[in-house]
Structures are given as C-alpha cells and as structure tokens.
Amino acid sequence: MTRSRLIKSRRSSSWFKYWIVYLTALYISALVVFSIVPSGYRPRLPGITLTEYEHFLAYLVLGGLVVISTPRSVRSVTIIAALAAFAGLVEIVQLAIPSRVASVTDFAAGASGAVIGVALAVLALRQSAIKRADPYRTSELPILASDRRDQNLRSVVLPPSDVRH
C-alpha cells in the first residue's frame, strides 16, 4: 500500500469513528426525547401494537451503536450494565410524567434488546477482525483460477512457517 493510500485510509477511518459517535449521541438523545414526551406525540412503528417490541428494537439498535462507537478497551459487560441502567432510568423518569406509564416489562424488553444488540455487534466486530487478520481465508468461497495462481506465488515467496492455512 502506498503512503498516500495509507494516509487516506486512516483519515476515512477516523472520520467514520467520529460520525458513529455523533450518530450514537443523536440516537440516545432521540430515545430520551421520545421516552419523555406525552404518548400522543411519540412516533409509532407501523404494524407493531405492543410497546415492548418497540423497546426491544430501540435498545437492540442502541446496543449495536454503543459497541461500535466505544473503544475496544471498554468491556461488553460494562456496556450492558450502562444500557440496562439507562433503560431503568428512563422508566423511572416516566413515573414523573403524567401521560406516561412506567413498566417493568418495558424495562425488561429494553434491557434484553440491549444485551442482544451488544452481543450481535461484538460478534460482528470479531468476525470482521478475523477476516482483516487473515484476508486469504477462502474456506467459505470457491477457489478461482486466479486465486490458485496467487496461492502458488505466495507459497513460493513466503517461507513455509509464514503461510497461513
């Protein structure tokens, strides 16, 4: 990779990280606003009659966004605990709003959505890290003639200890 290409890829990577953080903050803000406004002003998902499904989906997306936007040093358990506390705090705040009703089932739906969202995002990031670490991994894909030629060249150029299987 040339130096200019490497610099461009680093810039685009940092740009993406900043936008994911902003998107996550915007999503959390929207979730807070829609949780505290009166029921009539809150948007509804078409075809979904139970609010538990809406809570589950909202926190599923939130869990994925938080995992993607936080540094890798933050543990998944910490993210899950923070999102569960956030779901509980939203339900507690709804106790003070006359037109809103706090519910344990809404909290459970939000917390379980956060757990599954975090788990799916962590698995997706791990899978992409594995693919980045070993770009020649072709066990799932059919080997093309050009791939065979590249593998033959690699086996000639690299010593046997450096060849990945």
Image (spheres, helix red, strand yellow):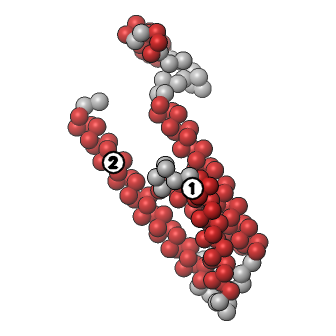
Name the disc covering residue 20, or none. none
Residue at the image point whose x is 23% and y is 34% from the top: 3
Name the disc covering residue 12, or none. 2
Image-based side of 148 in relation to 80, left or right: left
Q: How many badges with numbers are in the image?
A: 2
Give the Cα distance between marks 2 and 1. Answer: 21 Å
Where residue 136 appears, as percent x and y from the top left, is 48, 23
* Mark 1 element type: helix
Q: Amino acid at mark 2?
A: Ser
Residue at the image point whose x is 57% and y is 56% from the top: 64
Where residue 116 appears, as percent x and y from the top left, is 67, 55
Where residue 6 appears, as percent x and y from the top left, is 28, 37
As displayed, is residue 48 above or below residue 61?
below
Residue at the image point whose x is 65% and y is 84% from the top: 94
Placement of the N terminus among the 4 image quadrants: top left
Where residue 125 appears, as percent x and y from the top left, is 53, 44
* Mark 2 element type: helix
Does any portion of residue 151 appear in the rendered image? no
Q: Amino acid at mark 1?
A: Gly
The answer to which image quadrant residue 96 occupies is bottom right
Q: Which residue is mark 1?
A: 64
View extreme (left): residue: 4
As displayed, is residue 107 above or below residue 135?
below
Residue at the image point whose x is 63% and y is 83% from the top: 93
